[in-house]
């Protein structure tokens, strides 16, 4: 609406379908959150091989999902590599939860990813971990999970200290 009270219509040209893609991804995320809750829980600092790391549990809780919920994979970020010590090599899923079970979880380690100063300085989304999840319909979909924002500064500090303990700071001073 303009100052004189009139309105004008402006055409939005979206040749690359960016807006449609954003809308579809938002709808997909909303659908997944209606089916399940996927979260990092019990996030805390510990030591592994003499260096500090962050550990947690990846937890899935059923909501409206009717079938088997499976987390098929999870990607790390620039400063973090994800490790799942309870998952067998070659397993089809990182975590499975049947419809009759209210929740399931598996252990998770956030270990050092890239340790150079540039990696830490340039990481724009260091806590956006992309999981591939099937919420019981046989359709694997990407889903972003982030740790509690209040825990993120400590997690980043722990990763930097882990890099320092490994002697892999590349000039970065944690």
Image (cartoon, rainbow, N blue to C red):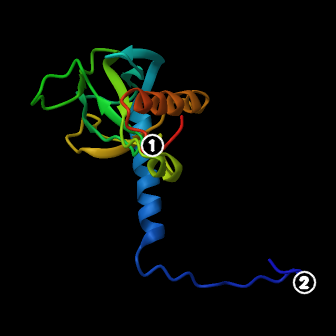
In the picture provided, is 144 more to the left or to the right than 88? right
**Precedes in sequence: disc 1 or disc 2:** 2
Which of 151 and 2 lies nearest the eye of the viewer?
151
Instruction: Report x, y in % for residue 43.
Output: 47, 20
Q: Residue at x 50, y 42 (%)?
A: 172
Q: Residue at x 53, y 30 (%)?
A: 157
**Quarter the C terminus occupies:** top right
**Quarter the N terminus occupies:** bottom right
Is disc 2 surrounded by few (<14), some (14 to 19) or many (20+) residues within 10 Å?
A: few
Q: Residue furthest left?
A: 90
Is disc 1 surrounded by few (<14), some (14 to 19) or many (20+) residues within 10 Å?
A: some
Mark 1 secondary-structure assignment: loop
Which residue is denoted by mark 1 in the rendering? 128
Which of 5 and 155 lies nearest the eye of the viewer?
155
Label 1 to label 2, Cα distance in Å? 45 Å
Mark 2 secondary-structure assignment: loop
* Residue 40 picture quarter: top left
Which residue is denoted by mark 2 in the rendering? 4
Q: Residue at x 32, y 18 (%)?
A: 105
* Residue contact between numbered discs 1 and 2, judged by CB atoms under 8 Å: no
Q: Nearer the viewer, mark 1 or mark 2?
A: 1
């Amino acid at each position: 609406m303009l100052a004189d009270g009139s309105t004008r219509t402006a055409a939005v040209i979206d040749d690359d379908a960016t807006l449609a893609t954003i809308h579809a991804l938002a709808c997909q995320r909303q659908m997944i959150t209606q089916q399940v809750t996927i979260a990092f829980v019990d996030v805390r600092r510990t030591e592994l091989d003499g260096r500090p790391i962050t550990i947690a549990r990846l937890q899935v809780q059923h909501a409206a999902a009717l079938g088997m919920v499976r987390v098929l994979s999870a990607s790390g970020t620039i400063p973090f590599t994800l490790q799942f010590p309870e998952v067998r090599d070659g397993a089809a899923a990182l975590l499975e939860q049947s419809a009759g079970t209210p929740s399931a979880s598996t252990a998770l380690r956030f270990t050092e990813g890239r340790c150079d100063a540039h990696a830490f300085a340039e990481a724009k989304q260091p806590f956006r971990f992309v999981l591939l999840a099937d919420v019981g319909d046989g359709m694997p979909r990407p889903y972003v999970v982030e740790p509690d924002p209040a825990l993120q500064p400590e997690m980043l500090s722990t990763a930097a200290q882990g890099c320092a303990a490994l002697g892999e700071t590349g000039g970065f001073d944690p």
